[in-house]
Amino acid sequence: MTNKPKEAVYRLLGAKIEQLRTMLGWSQADLAQKTRLTRGSIANIEAGNQRILLHDVERFSGAFSIAPKVLLRGIWF
C-alpha cells in the first residue's frame, strides 16, 4: 500500500490555519471549539491530511475574525 501524496492546496491552507492559530496562542482544542470541529480534524487539516469543505473555510475565517479571501490569500491568488 502506498501513501497518497498530500495535495499542495490542503498543505498550504493547513499551514496557514496553524500559523494563525499559534499566533493567537490557541491550542488545537481551542480552535476546534470555535469552529465546531473536532481536535482531530484540526490536527488533520493543519497537517494537510484532510480536505476542507467550503463552509469550513467560512468557519475558520469567522473564528479568526478575517474574511475568507484573507484566509485563502497566497494559496490560489
Image (cartoon, helix red, strand yellow):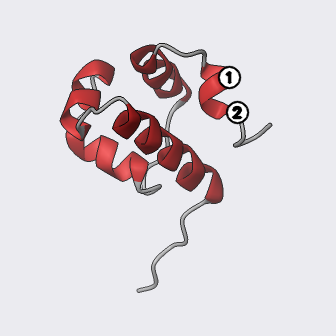
How far is disc 1 from disc 2 in space, using C-alphas?
6 Å
Kindly state the secondary structure of the residue where label 1 is placed.
Answer: helix
Q: Amino acid at mark 1?
A: Lys
Q: Dot 2 corresponds to which residue? A: 73
- 8 or 26, which lies in front? 26
Looking at the picture, how far across and down is residue 19, in whole percent? 45, 42
Q: Amino acid at mark 2?
A: Arg
Looking at the picture, how far across and down is residue 31, in whole percent? 29, 29
- Residue 67, by quadrant, is top right
Q: Residue at x 41, y 56 (%)?
A: 47
Q: Residue at x 39, y 18 (%)?
A: 63
Q: Dot 1 corresponds to which residue? A: 69
Mark 1 vs 2: CB contact within 8 A:
yes
Q: Residue at x 47, y 13 (%)?
A: 65
> In the rendered picture of this protein, how many numbered marks are placed on residues?
2
Left/right placement of residue 37 relative to residue 71 reads left
- Residue 66, by quadrant, is top right
Left/right placement of residue 43 relative to residue 1 reads left
